[in-house]
Image (cartoon, coloured by chain):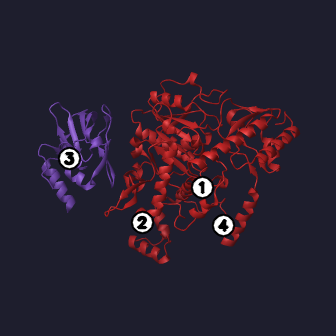
Amino acid sequence: MSELPGDLLYTKEHEWLRREDDGSVTIGITDHAQSALGDLVYVELPEVGQDVDEGGDMAVVESVKAASDVYAPIGGSVAAVNEVLADDPEKINSDPYGDGWIVRMQPSDGIDEAALMSPDAYQQFLDELDD
Amino acid sequence: MPFIPHTEKDTREMLEAIGADSLADLFDEIPAKLMIEHLPHVPEAMNEMEISRLMRQRATMDGSPMCFIGAGAYEHHIPTAVWDIATRGEFYSAYTPYQAEASQGTLQTIYEYQTMITELTGLDVSNASLYDGASALAEASLMAVRSNRRVKTGRVLLAPGVNPVYEKVASAIAGAQGLTFERLPQDTTSGNIDFESLPEGREPVAVVVQQPSFVGTLDDVDRLTDWAHAEGALVIGIVNPTSLALLRPPGQWGEEGADIAIGEGQPLGVPMSSGGPYFGFMTCRQKLVRQMPGRIVGRTTDLDGNPGFALTLQAREQHIRRSKATSNICTNQGLMVTAATIYMSLLGYEGLKRVANAAHANTTLLADGLCKIAGIERLYTGPFFHEVALRLDRPVAPLLAALAERNILAGFDLTSIVAADALLVCATETKTEADIKTFVAAFADAMAASDVKST
């Protein structure tokens, strides 16, 4: 398993968040999640401008085995979606923390960091899953 | 592959493995007050001899009347080979096995079926079939909501020609999921849509167009399709598969074509059987395929490069995605589809076209004959396919009863649907010129013997 990027926050749903300079938050799924799903064949993206509640369905990632919801880790409105994924969903497999980002959100409130995990905390969470 | 039920030993071992004492224990979580001990209208079980005798008695009650009723199910000649082949042991199961790829023959049949249905409807992909035509409308409407996410109204607009039974079934299934079904206005002269009073700004998620319409007419599907697309709606076409041998397929309606096509597959080799089992078909554009319910068979190659067939796009089916599946009634009607595939193979394009032409010619002959009787005229102007609505100068029900006495099922009573004394008649290729003359003469007799003012 590759090193977890140190500048990201993580969730128990195996998503990552990155704060951008303009106040928006980029969201994707972790290397662990893409590896568990297997080769992705389709990503269903939300509409730009759509409001999403915290914990609500935001996107669907589909592999040959399963279609899984991506839940919004924060509430807000969708500022941008990674259009590349429409034709190239396997970008999530090859570069989950980079070109495989899924959604950029404009948070409606601040980010509750206490509800999210640091790289170390997420690594520990993963280690416990393996036990 | 064989289908063998569990032995008592199997059942016992499975119960032991999960720590249950009896099968009844598996239903423990259902509250006692919801359990029904006795069903008063369900008779006691019968043995094979008793049930055979009962079914023979019931079968004779059907008789062998001459049938001029269409209204959604159609009597067609079914070549003997169809059911001779379909009931071979290799095909004779209603279901795709759960270990589907072990049954390559079943999958290939479904694949051939999908290919034929997409060619008939002029769209890109077909599923392995649905329960029936009516529930296919519910599934298509739900599919439209999932696909057309810009529109949040859940409002589905139905052309006046949509089968009223389909509307009932669709709103029973999809109504509880927030969908509403509304009718578009009808031009009472043509029976078709009234383009002059189309509603604006209703934000429909889908517009449903049936061709031929329930009352037999042919709507301006091109104009309606273009209007619906301009309103931001997806277009769902309900079509009769036999008619597609003559009429333009939904995939070619208007500028862009319909987005989803559905219909009742019964005319393709399935007997009327007092109402079922039938099958629903569904096709759509490639870009909507991930929202299509049901199973889809794809052609692929194995490790050695040999062609083979596999279920594809299963990730959204209920055995994987549970409550978030594209459908939770994604039954397919494998046996009926097998029959339809054989039927279409035997007839081919030319055969299906001959069937459609003969049905149209017979219905024309029938309508001309009946309209020569005083007190009968066409209810609507304009062309029809193999079904036509007639206006009568007196109540319909007593006439139907009188003709039933003479072993003729004289048509479908439209009175409650069109708020006029009206009858829908159909003569498929199964009727001869002599049959039609017999029917017309019997109808004239019944008219002569009945009173215009009777109720």
How crowded pointer 4 is (Cα within 10 Å; few <14, some 14-19, many 20+) is rated as few
Quick one: SS at disc 1? loop
Mark-to-mark CA distance, 3 and 2: 36 Å
Is any atom of residue A111 visible in this view? no
Is any atom of residue B34 visible in this view? yes
Q: Which chain is red?
A: B
User: Residue B148, located in which quarter of the rendered image?
Assistant: top left
Residue A45 is left or right of residue B130, and the answer is left
Mark-to-mark CA distance, 4 and 1: 24 Å
Quadrant that contains the N terminus of chain A: bottom left
Mark 2, residue position: B102
Quick one: SS at disc 3? loop
- Say whether disc 4 or disc 1 marks the residue closer to the N-terminus: 4
Q: Amino acid at mark 1?
A: Pro
Q: Amino acid at mark 3?
A: Pro
Q: Which chain is purple?
A: A
Q: Residue furthest bottom?
A: B9
Q: Chain of mark 1?
A: B
Q: Amino acid at mark 2?
A: Ala
Mark 4, residue position: B44
- Asked whether the beta carbons under mark 4 and mark 1 sit within 8 Å of each other, the answer is no
